[in-house]
Image: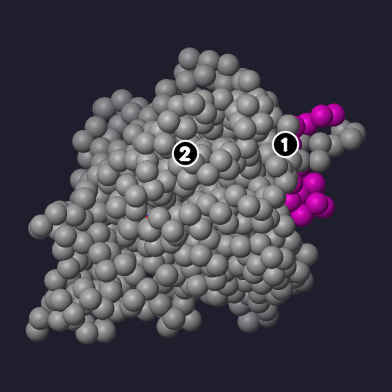
């Protein structure tokens, strides 16, 4: 097996591009084109192409580390490290109760790992205090999708439907940088005569592809969507028959939209009435049209309502459930979709079941062989959990996230992590968060282990082991098996991913995200299967569900629900002291907290460090030239990075990527104000002051 090409998938983003991996005799791994996977047809971005560099990197962890008496992390044996973790977690639990032990997961973990982590927290630790970084990612879109459609699957259709649509509105997605191979679908859309509208405060590489680019002030997408809906009503462009047959709640939503006059919306957003009218015309005239949102409108303290407003626009014009039409969210992390379905979320059980639903508890408890009454209730959301570290949560087990760089108000979260009695981190490198741990466990990576992920289309995929891991590392599943064993639970934590998946199938059966008809064999043969895929006897096998909502929505009455929403301000509006808006995001050559991609020379050469993107007018006022260090100051802290001066950004806004720790850490500045429904922090806008740095 281990010297021929193995078909597998990229470790990074939610496209989950297919690739072939071939180990070379010199110990490196070659990435080959895998044309049979329809999402990327062989194309890869620079991150995917260079991903093997992290497998053999000199900074790869290959031995457990334990913090010694003198405060340094020193190599230790696996037995010492596991004993230490089990001992500390038991001690904290005995002294302070099970909820004093916290667990933090990640949307990059495979389905098998995410499932096992949720089960480990509830069955072995008995804690309610588990959540994960997906809360920082697409939780607002998930909450809005659940409200409107009764189901949250990022895209309700495959990406290949995009080129057949008449118009696509991309709201706050810079996919030319965040999912480069997906740009092909949008190029084909335009070749076919469809149009692309991009809504982003910056003229990004994605916006440059658009037929129409609207550049609202950060945090005002809710008003923008309401203004468009107002015009749809005023211009008689609603689909009355669809509204009558397939939806409920229109009257209230309509009334809210009518209260948002285009002129009022222009004042809030900075998008002119003629631009709004043009967007409405482009969206409404074709037979089919889509709205796709990403982090821009979602990472706001009103993200759920904002996505709700875009869904209302789609419903009023009769889009969801029709061919090449509807609303979708572009999920971000490698397993951002599957990672939110199988129980690492604070309020959730596998199969997208609710932890407070008695029937769900009964079903899952039976699969787990425990008493339903023994399962804890819902816990805190990610930011709230991190904020409680060192107070009532005394110890934390963390797997698949680097919050020292990626959490909002990061200096405070760093200090919370430092105040813990005990921190254990599983990672492949010594991330900034792992560097604070009492015990660090080195784990296997994507190419060294098998597992499934679910991409942004809801397509469940098989990632295959292609190479032998270095000696000294173990898989996350082995870690949980060993810890469960030491904590008195000998059964139920297998180390073989297929065995975990077989149990996940049963646990998810009958749930919204039903994987029971999916097997490793099918995934290998069919190149992925879309959920829901219930087991309907062996023959015929359920084909999976690439497209949702054709006949009915997943609500009790089968109708989609309009949600009445009204515009509101961001949690922190600019004032005299902090007159500028900061927004944050990504660049093409770094991934997330950078823990992995900052180890790759080629990527560092392309994106060496943080920067502050600002308009020439703002730069002139500061007297800052290109490359000069500028300080960005918010109520939470100060960050310094070189100026990058461009007319591509609004003069009232600055932008920073969040991939780096240290002086230029964007999250030193960000505001942890939470959306009341999704508990998503407001990464996309806070008030700042920009200062020149002299000398
Ligand atoms: N290269 C790279 N690719 C990635 C990742 C990465 O870190 N690096 N991460 C992956 C993950 S987990 C995710 S979640 C996705 C994220 O993918 P995207 O959502 O595309 O990424 P972002 O850069 O966070 O935000 C997108 C755009 O939102 C704009 N924006 C900022 N504020 C607002 C606003 O108020 N309204 C609107 N409409 N737009 C706004 C920003 O200017 C930015 O261009 O990318 C995935 N792919
Ligand atoms: N300002 C600002 N902040 C943001 C955002 C933003 O737009 N602006 N976006 C937010 C979003 S959308 C996201 S998704 C988060 C992401 O931010 P993080 O949660 O920090 O995500 P990563 O940097 O991917 O961290 C993953 C960590 O797990 C490790 N790892 C990788 N694979 C495995 C594995 O299989 N097992 C284990 N145990 N470890 C593994 C990696 O080495 C890395 O240290 O950041 C959020 N933070
Ligand atoms: S687009 Fe995403 S999945 Fe594809 S190669 Fe790049 S990082 Fe990997
Ligand atoms: Mo994300």
Image quarter in which the N terminus is found: bottom right
Ligand 1 within 8 angstroms of badge 2 C-beta: no
In percent of width and height, residue 31 lies at 66, 74
Instruction: Indicate yes or no whether the magenta region holds residue 521.
Output: yes
* Residue sitting at x 25%, y 59%: 581
In percent of width and height, residue 674 lies at 31, 40
Pointer 1 and pointer 2: residues touching (CB < 8 Å)?
no
* Residue sitting at x 30%, y 51%: 268
Report whether residue 23 is seen.
no
The residue wearing badge 1 is 550
* Residue sitting at x 16%, y 60%: 579
Instruction: Choose top left, top right, bottom left or bottom right for residue 501.
Output: top right
Q: In this view, does 558 lie to the left or right of 582?
A: right
Q: In this view, does 378 lie to the left or right of 673?
A: right
User: Which residue sits furthest front?
Assistant: 235
In-front residue for pair 99/285: 285
Magenta stretch bounds: 518-537
Question: Which color mode does the image show?
Answer: one colour
Image quarter in which the C terminus is found: bottom left
In this figure, what is the number of numbered marks? 2
In percent of width and height, residue 299 lies at 38, 49
494 over 50 or under it: above or below? above
The residue wearing badge 2 is 308
Could you classify mark 1 by the number of other residues whose Cα lies within 10 Å: few (under 14), some (14-19), or many (20 or more)?
A: few
In percent of width and height, residue 334 lies at 55, 55
């Amino acid at each position: 097996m281990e010297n021929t090409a193995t078909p597998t998938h990229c470790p990074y983003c939610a496209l989950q591009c297919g690739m072939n991996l071939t180990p070379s005799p010199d110990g490196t791994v070659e990435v080959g084109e895998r044309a049979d996977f329809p999402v990327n047809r062989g194309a890869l971005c620079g991150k995917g192409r260079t991903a093997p560099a992290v497998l053999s990197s000199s900074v790869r962890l290959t031995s457990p580390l334990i913090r010694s008496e003198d405060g340094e992390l020193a190599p230790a044996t696996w037995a010492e490290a596991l004993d230490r973790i089990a001992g500390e977690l038991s001690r904290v639990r005995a002294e302070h109760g099970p909820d004093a032990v916290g667990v933090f997961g990640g949307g990059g973990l495979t389905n098998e790992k995410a499932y096992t982590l949720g089960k480990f927290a509830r069955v072995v630790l008995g804690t309610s205090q588990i959540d994960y970084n997906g809360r920082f990612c697409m939780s607002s879109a998930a909450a809005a999708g659940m409200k409107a459609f009764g189901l949250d699957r990022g895209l309700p259709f495959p990406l290949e439907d995009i080129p057949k649509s008449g118009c696509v509105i991309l709201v706050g997605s810079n996919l030319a940088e965040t999912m480069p191979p997906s740009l092909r679908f949008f190029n084909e859309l335009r070749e076919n005569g469809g149009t692309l509208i991009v809504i982003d405060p910056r003229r990004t590489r994605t916006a440059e592809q658009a037929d129409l680019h609207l550049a609202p002030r950060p945090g005002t997408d809710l008003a923008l969507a309401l203004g468009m809906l107002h015009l749809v009503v005023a211009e008689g462009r609603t689909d009355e028959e669809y509204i009558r047959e397939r939806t409920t709640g229109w009257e209230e939503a309509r009334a809210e939209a009518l209260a948002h006059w285009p002129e009022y919306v222009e004042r809030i957003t900075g998008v002119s009435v003629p631009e709004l009218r043009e967007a409405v015309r482009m969206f409404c005239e074709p037979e089919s049209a889509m709205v796709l949102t990403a982090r821009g409108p979602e990472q706001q303290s009103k993200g759920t309502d904002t996505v709700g407003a875009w869904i209302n626009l789609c419903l009023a014009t009769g889009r969801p459930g029709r061919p090449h039409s509807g609303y979708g969210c572009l999920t971000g992390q490698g397993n951002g979709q599957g990672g939110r379905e199988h129980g690492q979320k604070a309020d959730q059980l596998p199969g997208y079941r609710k932890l407070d639903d008695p029937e769900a508890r009964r079903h899952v408890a039976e699969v787990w062989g425990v008493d339903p009454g023994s399962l804890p209730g819902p816990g805190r959301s990610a930011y709230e959990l991190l904020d409680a570290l060192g107070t009532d949560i005394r110890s934390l087990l963390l797997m698949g996230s680097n919050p020292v760089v990626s959490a909002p108000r990061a200096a405070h979260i760093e200090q919370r992590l430092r105040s813990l009695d005990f921190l254990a981190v599983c990672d492949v490198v010594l991330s900034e968060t792992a560097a604070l741990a009492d015990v660090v466990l080195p784990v296997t990576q994507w190419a060294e282990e098998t597992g499934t992920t679910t991409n942004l289309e809801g397509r469940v995929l098989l990632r295959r082991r292609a190479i032998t891991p270095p000696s000294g590392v173990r898989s996350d599943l082995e870690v949980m098996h060993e810890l469960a064993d030491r904590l008195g639970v000998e059964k139920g934590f297998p180390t073989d991913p297929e065995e975990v998946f077989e149990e996940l199938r049963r646990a998810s059966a009958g749930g919204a995200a039903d994987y029971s008809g999916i097997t490793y064999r099918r995934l290998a043969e069919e190149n992925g299967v879309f959920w829901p895929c219930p087991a309907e006897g062996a023959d015929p096998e359920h084909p999976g569900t690439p497209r949702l909502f054709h006949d009915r929505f997943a609500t009790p009455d089968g109708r989609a629900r309009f949600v009445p929403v009204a515009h509101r301000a961001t949690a922190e509006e600019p004032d005299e002291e902090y007159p500028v808006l900061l927004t944050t995001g990504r660049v093409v050559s770094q991934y997330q907290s950078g823990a992995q991609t900052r180890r790759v020379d080629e990527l560092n050469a392309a994106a060496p460090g943080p920067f502050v993107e600002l308009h020439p007018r703002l730069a002139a006022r500061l007297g800052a030239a290109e490359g000069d260090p500028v300080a960005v100051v918010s109520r939470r802290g100060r960050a310094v990075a070189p100026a990058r001066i461009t007319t591509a950004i609004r003069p009232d806004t600055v932008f920073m990527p969040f991939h780096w720790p240290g002086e230029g850490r964007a999250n030193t500045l960000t505001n942890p104000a939470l959306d009341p429904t999704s508990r998503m922090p407001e990464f996309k806008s806070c008030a700042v002051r920009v200062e020149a740095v002299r000398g």
